[in-house]
Amino acid sequence: MAKIKVKQVKSGIKRPQNQKRTLEALGLRKIGQVVEHEDTPSILGMIDTVKHLVSTEA
């Protein structure tokens, strides 16, 4: 499977609890942090949930 890089670009403060938990599940804690994940449907769904808080790169 392909890898996808996810970078947090906005804060999770004042966001709904499900978005905060999604950021945590992706392994994102700080703005500017980058994590790498497999390109699976579950990860893509998580990214879609917080697409306004993160940027992605293949």
Image: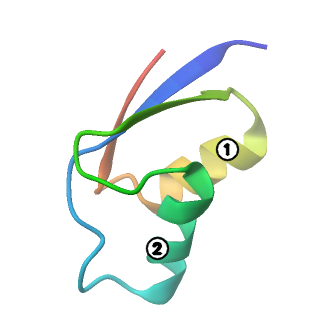
Look at the numbered disc 1 and give the secondary structure of its residue.
Answer: helix
Left or right: residue 32 versus residue 37 is: left
Residue 53 placement: quadrant: bottom left
Q: Which residue is mark 2?
A: 19
Disc 1 to disc 2, C-alpha distance? 14 Å
Q: Residue at x 20, y 57 (%)?
A: 10
Looking at the rendered structure, the kind of residue marked 1 is Ile
The label on residue 23 is none
Look at the numbered disc 2 and give the secondary structure of its residue.
Answer: helix
Left or right: residue 25 versus residue 28 is: right
> Which of the marked residues, 1 or 2, is nearer the chain's N terminus?
2
Q: Which residue is mark 1?
A: 43
Q: Residues within 10 Å of mark 2 (few under 14, many from 20)?
A: some
Residue 40 placement: quadrant: top right
Q: Vertical placement of 26 versus 49: above or below?
A: above
Q: Residue at x 75, y 41 (%)?
A: 41
Horizontal and vertical percent for residue 36?
A: 55, 27
- Contact (Cβ within 8 Å) of mark 1 with mark 2: no
Q: Vertical placement of 52 versus 21: above or below?
A: above
Horizontal and vertical percent for residue 43?
A: 67, 44
Looking at the rendered structure, the kind of residue marked 2 is Gln
Q: Residue at x 55, y 23 (%)?
A: 4
